[in-house]
Amino acid sequence: MPVERTRYGKINIDIDSNTLIILFTILFFACFLLWRDSKKGQKEKAQLLQDLEEKKNIANKEAMIAAKEAVQKDIEKFQEETKERRRELSRIEDKLTKKEEILEEKNIAIATKEAELQKKMDEVLEKEDYLAETIQKQMQELERISGLSTEEAKKIMFEQLKVDLQQEANNLIRENENYIREVSNEKAKEILTTVMQRCVIDHVVESTVSSVSLPSDEMKGRIIGREGRNIRTLETLTGVDLIIDDTPEAVVLSCFDPVRREIAKLALEKLVSDGRIHPVRIEEMVEKAREEIEQKIKQEGENAAMEMGIPNLNKELIKTLGRLYYRTSYGQNVLIHSLEVGHIAGMIAAEIGANVKIAKRAGLLHDIGKAIDQTQEGTHIELGVELARKYGEREEVVHAIEAHHDDVTANSIEAVLVKLADAISAGRPGSRRDTLEIYIKRLQKLEEIALSYEGIKQSFAVQAGREVRVIVQPDKFDDIGSARLARDIANRIEEELDYPGQIRVTVVREIRTTELAK
């Protein structure tokens, strides 16, 4: 196959016929191979599609078979459950059938009995008619013989019976009254004697003075202070009279209010022990003593409740009860008196079968109103009832408090026992002193008159009731107003009180200004 290069670089190829046939043969063979491969690929593809279709059909058939099996199982299960329910319904039906048969038998028996009862009732009615007719004939015959009607005979018989019964009742009542009177008196004496012997409580008549021991007489001068400023400060802050006389190594505190007297005593003991006595220190010690007394009051209330066996008493009632430790009634300590009343009422209740808890609780709280400050209006019974109701005491306890001085009629045995125990405790020889109570009431009245005016800060009856010191709020009174107030208080004291000698009214108006140097 010759090759020629032309002028312009192109190549001319001369192909002969043999070469051309070879080329066509090769080309035909290549096309044949390509066509054969294509046919083969189509067959394989068709075969693959056919295989996939067969697998799909097989899978569908298997799914259908599995579904049919599941449905068959559900059908069999449902059929089994249906059979079980049918058997259960059959059993229930058998039971109901048996019950119906039993009820039918009972109905037949009841019907038979009703028929028998009806027959007997008819017989009874016939007999009643016969008896009524017989009785009527007899009554007519009796009326004919006696000459009295039935109503007249009944009236005579009832009157005679009434007379006989009244005579018998009178005799029985008289015999029982004598027996009850003899037995009850002996039993009451026995119970009261036993209770009074069991209730052992010391009675100490309270005094209005206390004494404070001093290490030496030199301390008296320090207590008085320069120009008496220390003793005036202590008396003003506490409302207590300090009596410094010739008694060796002792100072006497005089005040009708035990709380104020105890605060002053405790504060003075602290000052004597500390040695530093001046107005500022006195104020600090008085405040500390007041806090300690408040704690003491709470402790005494808790001790009283614990001794009486009342663990669930309200906290405010406990605090108020503790204040009775510093209250007196005709010289008798009110808290000790309340404890004694509670014990006596509880023991009597146990002897006669009454409610011991109610009796003891009411006995302990019967004089709780005496702990209330005198600025509140009302008797100690009214205040006590108000307190008990306020703090959730039971109505039986409130009624016993209200009835222990016959303000209302006692309608429970516990209220009667509290009243009886109060009389026993107060009437015991040596338990009370009347003259001291009258004196204390006069001092309390002096302070009440002073506190009844507006703008009063504090009021103290001192010097055994011969002087009233009234501390006013400085912004409410000027000098002229203070003088007018002293005159008004003096006039009211003259009109409302009976007292020996004279009573001095002193109005104190004090202004303090404090600044800090930094």
Image (cartoon, helix red, strand yellow):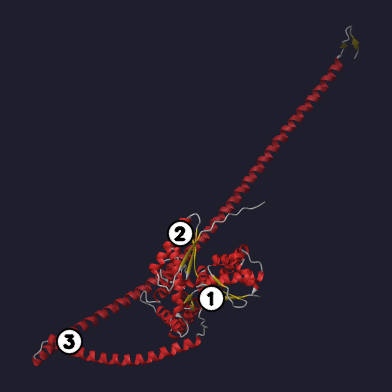
Label 1: which residue? 209
Q: Amino acid at mark 1?
A: Val
* Few, some or many residues within 10 Å of mark 2 (<14, 14–19, 20+): few
Give the mark toward the camera: 2 or 3. Answer: 2
Among the two numbered marks 2 and 3 on one chain, the one whose residue lies closer to the N terminus: 3
Query: What mark, if any, has residue 58 been given in the picture?
Result: none
Query: What mark, if any, has residue 483 been given in the picture?
Result: 2
Q: Which secondary structure lies at badge 1?
A: strand
- Residue ID at (17%, 89%): 157
* Few, some or many residues within 10 Å of mark 1 (<14, 14–19, 20+): some
Q: Amino acid at mark 2?
A: Ala
- Residue ID at (48%, 64%): 506
Q: Nearer the viewer, residue 67 or 333?
A: 333
Among the two numbered marks 1 and 3 on one chain, the one whose residue lies closer to the N terminus: 3
Q: CA distance from mark 1 to mark 3?
A: 97 Å
Q: CA distance from mark 2 to mark 3?
A: 107 Å
Query: What mark, if any, has residue 131 been given in the picture?
Result: 3
Q: Nearer the viewer, residue 416 or 160?
A: 416
Q: Quadrant of residue 163?
A: bottom left
**Residue 243 x, y percent position in the rendering:** 56, 73
Q: CA distance from mark 2 to mark 1?
A: 31 Å
On screen, 178 above or below 36? below
Q: Is residue 93 visible?
A: yes
**Residue 169 x, y percent position in the rendering:** 26, 90
